[in-house]
Amino acid sequence: MGLGVDFGGTKIEAVWLAEDGSEHGRMRVPTPRGDYDASLRAVAELVARVEAAAGVRGAPVGVGIPGTIAPDSGLVRGGNATWLSGRAFDRDLAALLDRPVKVTNDANCFALSEALDGAGAGAPTVFGVILGTGVGGGLVIGGRLVEGANNVAGEWGHSPLPARSAEELDGPRCFCGRRGCLEVWLSGPAISADHARVLGLERAPAAPEIAAQAAAGDPAARATLDRHLDRLARSLGWVVNLIDPHVIVLGGGVSNMDHLYRDLAPRVLPHVMADRAHVEIRRARHGDSSGVRGAARLWELP
């Protein structure tokens, strides 16, 4: 198939994906945060190492990045890896690797992977949700990635929280400059920040620790997760009303919270404009490998 690269804010991962879907030479390195040229070199060096380990040469390369490439300028915009913004990342990397490169949003790669041979395989429409350090989404219809006229299809992370309460009207500020984006309500750091804000803590535990406290019966932790569940349900209700996907697949660190697969779908239903509805929410089959696997499959697309 091809060689995929998942460029994240803290790590860069690459793998060679064979025709049978098996992975070869999978490796990861820390991301050189804030350094654009070092980031390009890190990707190029990782590609060379994976190719050597997998025994291939000159493989087509697909890359998932935080943010999108603007179709008019060809420059990266958005995404919390801000040192890529305003740069011609795909062209610069292609020149360094001396081969064609396809680049898209990392959530698109996740959605593509899960739609083709993951938790959404066989479903006509799949909406892939990333709930991690940031929040993103990708849409696959009929096995084809939908990027849209402006390359922002599925980018729900920077939409406002629906049906806001009085306490939610002036939401936290997002890195994008807006207030109250879904990212500052639904991400892992957002869970921690909300817990601290409500309890008046100077520093709150990370989201996995809050989840562990809730499982142990801590009422404040349970309340924090319930607020997150309610906000996520409202947000996914908006997605269902807009595109009505057959399957919603959750990925990212927050998606490892087991209660989501028990409690989330029933909480979404009241926000769906249908008297009878079914919302199918599944855990990603490929876990944190989905992004890099989807990137490797970008060259399969027309």
Image: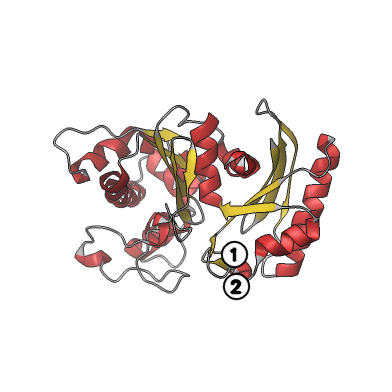
x and y percentages locating residue 141 in the rendered image: 42, 39
In-image side of 164 versus 79 (left or right): left
Quarter the N terminus occupies = top right
**Horizontal and vertical percent for residue 271?**
21, 46
Quarter of the image for residue 33 reads bottom right
- Residue lying at 34% horizontally and 39% vertically, measured from the top left: 245
User: Hey, which quadrant is residue 123 in on the image?
Assistant: top left
At x 39%, y 72%, the residue is: 178
Q: Residue at x 40, y 62 (%)?
A: 158
Badge 1 marks a residue whose secondary structure is loop
Q: Earlier in the sequence, mark 1 or mark 2?
A: 1
Q: Single out the mark in the foreground, 1 or 2.
A: 2
- In this rendering, is residue 181 above or below 119? below
Amino acid at circle 2: Gly
Report the disc number at residue 86.
Answer: 2
Can you identify the residue that label 1 sits on? Answer: 81
Q: Name above or below for residue 221 compared with residue 300.
A: below
- Which of the 4 image quarters holds residue 172? bottom left
- Secondary structure, mark 2, is loop
Marks 1 and 2 close (CB-CB < 8 Å): no
Q: Nearer the viewer, residue 246 or 135?
A: 246
User: Amino acid type of disc 1?
Assistant: Ala
In front here: 159 or 179?
159
Residue 95 place in picture, x, y as percent: 77, 61
* Label 2 crowd (10 A; few <14 / some 14-19 / many >=20): some
Residue at the front extreme, as displayed: 302
Camera-side residue of 209 and 135: 135
The residue carrying pointer 1 sits among few (fewer than 14), some (14 to 19) or many (20 or more) residues within 10 Å by Cα, namely some
